[in-house]
């Protein structure tokens, strides 16, 4: 090692030892009474000097080893064994100590006299991974149009206390390979199914020539759209198309907001009914078959949400587009008869039977539950209703039902049902299709045989693996669906007057006294219930409120603010009952010019949103980003760990996004 480097490695301690010796000598010669102390000081100085020499030698060997390791690395790079860019950097501050010619050419650093940091070349680079003992950076870095993968190692040293830690970084140009990867991702296959979801409606009672003309018009519309997108289109059934495209084409379709949904409505039949389609798209599957399965699930989801929309299914999630228009009634009596027969077989083959609605059960949930009790009684089975007496909105109806001998001991808690349930138990869920909304999630998860009877548009987190699913989003209420089941499975004498009353109250509740979401089948169900003893006057009494509840409802209405001309939003900072909030949301729609209403209020650690619509706005789609659900005219949401103000901001943003799409 040369003298200059040797001097750099030796700390300048000689002067200090000379001064210590001089002080000891002065004490020895001039202070006779301190000779003993001076001797001790001199001896200690000699010992410290000896320790200094030994530690200095050890330190010199450590630093020499450290520098030799770095020198070997530099010499290897200089010989050309590593032609890719290399940089030696200080890991504490990122200063570039040395770099080879390839790195200089890549980075443009020519002047090696100026101190440069690695972040001057790659602003996003981080050496924490190297300090943590990893040999490859977690992400690639970019320099201009090139993309590099970064690898490296720490220059090892034998003494952890010495020197600054150095690291060697190796930059591998992955641009061409990553371009191939990007092209692979852009060209991944996308399978989509296009379904004319009201084909029977627009071709009903038409001559063959008119049907052929409608078919040709729809095909031309779909064909023109497919040609513009690019891909392979094949008609596989009279109302179904298979369309294959690449991932890059899907991005264009999403950007255009699925223009086919709007363009196909230009095709109408002689009666003026416009054609509507649903699109189910599957992607990210391991094969074409899996992508097709995803597309089939997406079509099922689109139809269960009312149709006239596009749904994308990847390996993990559903994504929804369109669906702003409210669904039309497309149910058939054939399906109701088939469902009644299938449910009857399941009931006959089951042991314990439990009926469960959503949390805070309302008149529709309880009315539908009482109808299912009647259905099971006709099959010779006793069904029990899962009921929470502390939190519900149907207390008056429950008290009426309990007065009937047939309902003695039929209301039980979810915990009691868990104890009683056996492998042959059957659970019938009414008025909801979301697992996190049921009265007892534990019971739902413990019973293997589950049936769902619901009218709400399906959400992404719906109850899966059901043995029977009677799901009709075009129905007004779950009570209407259960009434149709009773029409095809029981005699009028089998239905108790209180059960008919309960079912009618559910229909009245969800239709706002036959004002919204009311179709021909709704009136048929109501007429049937009326004929077997349901008295509208008695039903109306179930909706009465006391003076305190009435004043509370109008206090909420006073807090409402108008937004976007036809929307009323009423945020309040105090807790109220869900029934009062729902009634206030209904009452806001009676104000001239208001077609959509939202009521927000706190309840425990969450904020409840109650939404109503009698216009074009689809409140379910507005509340879905907030975790809510329901249907186009009636929806709700429960948001945890947020204040009313924060939820109000989220709601306004969701409303703005809905109208901007």
Image: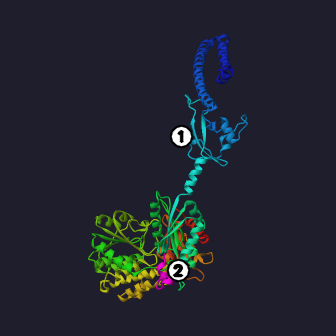
Q: Which residues are magenta?
A: 197-214
Q: Nearer the viewer, mark 2 or mark 1?
A: 2
Q: Residue at x 28, y 77 (%)?
A: 379
Question: SS at mark 2?
Answer: helix
Q: Residue at x 46, y 78 (%)?
A: 474
Nearer to the camera, 283 or 450: 283
Mark 2 neighbour class, 10 Å CA radius: few under 14, some 14 to 19, many 20 or more: many
Q: Position of residue 258 (x, y in %)?
A: 57, 69
Specify whether 313 is left or right of 89.
left
Q: CA distance from mark 2 to mark 1?
A: 64 Å
Nearer to the camera, 554 or 513: 513
Nearer to the camera, 295 or 20: 295
**In the rendered image, which quarter contains the N terminus?**
top right
Specify whether 200 is left or right of 90.
left
Q: Can residue 601 be seen?
A: no
* Mark nearer the N terminus (2 vs 1): 1
**In the rendered image, which quarter contains the C terminus?**
bottom right
Q: Position of residue 153 (x, y in %)?
A: 56, 36
Q: Magenta span has 504? A: no
Q: Which residue is mark 2?
A: 214
Q: Residue at x 55, y 60 (%)?
A: 247
Q: Which residue is mark 1?
A: 134
């Amino acid at each position: 090692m040369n003298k200059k480097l040797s001097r750099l490695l030796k700390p300048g301690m000689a002067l200090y030892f000379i001064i210590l010796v001089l002080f000891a000598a002065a004490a020895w010669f001039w202070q006779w009474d301190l000779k003993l102390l001076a001797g001790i000081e001199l001896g200690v100085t000699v010992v410290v000097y000896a320790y200094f020499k030994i530690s200095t030698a050890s330190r010199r060997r450590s630093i020499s080893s450290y520098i030799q390791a770095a020198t070997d690395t530099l010499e290897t790079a200089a010989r050309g064994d590593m032609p890719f860019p290399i940089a030696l950097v200080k890991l504490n501050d990122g200063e570039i100590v040395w770099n080879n010619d390839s790195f200089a050419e890549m980075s443009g650093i020519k002047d090696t006299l100026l101190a440069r940091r690695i972040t001057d070349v790659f602003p996003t680079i981080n050496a924490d991974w190297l300090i943590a003992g990893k040999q490859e950076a977690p992400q690639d870095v970019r320099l201009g149009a090139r993309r590099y993968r970064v690898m490296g190692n720490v220059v090892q040293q034998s003494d952890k206390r010495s020197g600054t830690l150095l690291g060697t970084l190796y930059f591998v140009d992955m641009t061409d390979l990553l371009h191939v990867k990007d092209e692979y991702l852009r060209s991944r296959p996308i399978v989509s199914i296009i379904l004319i979801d009201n084909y029977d409606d627009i071709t009903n009672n038409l001559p063959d020539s008119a049907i052929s003309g409608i078919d040709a018009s729809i095909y031309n519309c779909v064909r023109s759209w497919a040609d513009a997108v690019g891909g392979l289109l094949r008609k596989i059934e009279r109302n179904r198309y298979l369309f294959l495209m690449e991932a890059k084409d899907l991005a264009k379709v999403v950007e255009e907001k699925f223009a086919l949904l709007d363009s196909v409505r230009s095709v109408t039949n002689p009666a003026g009914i416009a054609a509507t389609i649903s699109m189910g798209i599957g992607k990210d599957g391991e094969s074409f078959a899996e992508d097709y399965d995803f597309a089939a699930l997406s079509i099922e989801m689109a139809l269960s949400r009312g149709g006239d929309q596009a749904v994308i299914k990847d390996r993990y999630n559903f994504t929804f587009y369109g669906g702003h228009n409210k669904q039309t009634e497309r149910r058939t009596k054939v399906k109701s008869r088939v469902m009644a027969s299938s449910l009857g077989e399941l009931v006959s083959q089951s042991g314990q039977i439990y009926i469960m609605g959503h949390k805070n059960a309302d008149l529709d949930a309880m009315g539908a539950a009482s109808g299912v009790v009647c259905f099971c009684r006709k099959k010779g089975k006793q069904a029990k209703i899962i009921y929470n007496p502390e939190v519900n909105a149907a207390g008056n109806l429950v008290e009426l039902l309990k007065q009937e001998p047939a309902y003695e001991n039929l209301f039980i808690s979810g915990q009691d049902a868990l104890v009683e349930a056996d492998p042959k138990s059957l659970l019938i869920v009414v008025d909801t299709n979301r697992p996190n909304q049921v009265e007892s999630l534990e019971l739902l998860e413990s019973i293997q045989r589950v049936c769902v009877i619901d009218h709400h548009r399906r959400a992404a987190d719906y109850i899966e693996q059901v043995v029977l699913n009677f799901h009709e989003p075009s129905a007004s209420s779950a009570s209407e669906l259960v009434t149709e089941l009773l029409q095809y499975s029981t005699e009028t004498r089998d239905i108790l007057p209180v059960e008919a009353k309960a079912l009618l109250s559910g229909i009245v509740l969800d239709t706002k006294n036959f004002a919204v979401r009311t179709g021909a089948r709704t009136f048929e169900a109501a007429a049937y219930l009326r004929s077997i003893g349901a008295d509208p006057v008695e039903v109306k009494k179930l909706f009465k409120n006391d003076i305190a509840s009435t004043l509370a409802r109008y206090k909420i209405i006073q807090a409402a603010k108008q937004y976007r001309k036809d929307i009323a939003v009423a945020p309040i900072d105090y807790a109220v009952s869900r029934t009062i909030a729902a009634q206030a949301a209904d009452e806001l729609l009676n104000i001239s010019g208001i077609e959509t209403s939202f009521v927000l209020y706190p309840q425990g650690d969450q904020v409840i949103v109650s939404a109503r619509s009698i216009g074009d706005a689809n409140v379910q789609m507005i509340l879905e980003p907030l975790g809510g659900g329901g249907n186009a005219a009636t929806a709700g949401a429960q948001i945890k760990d947020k204040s009313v103000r924060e939820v109000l901001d989220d709601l306004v943003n969701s409303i703005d996004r809905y109208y901007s799409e």
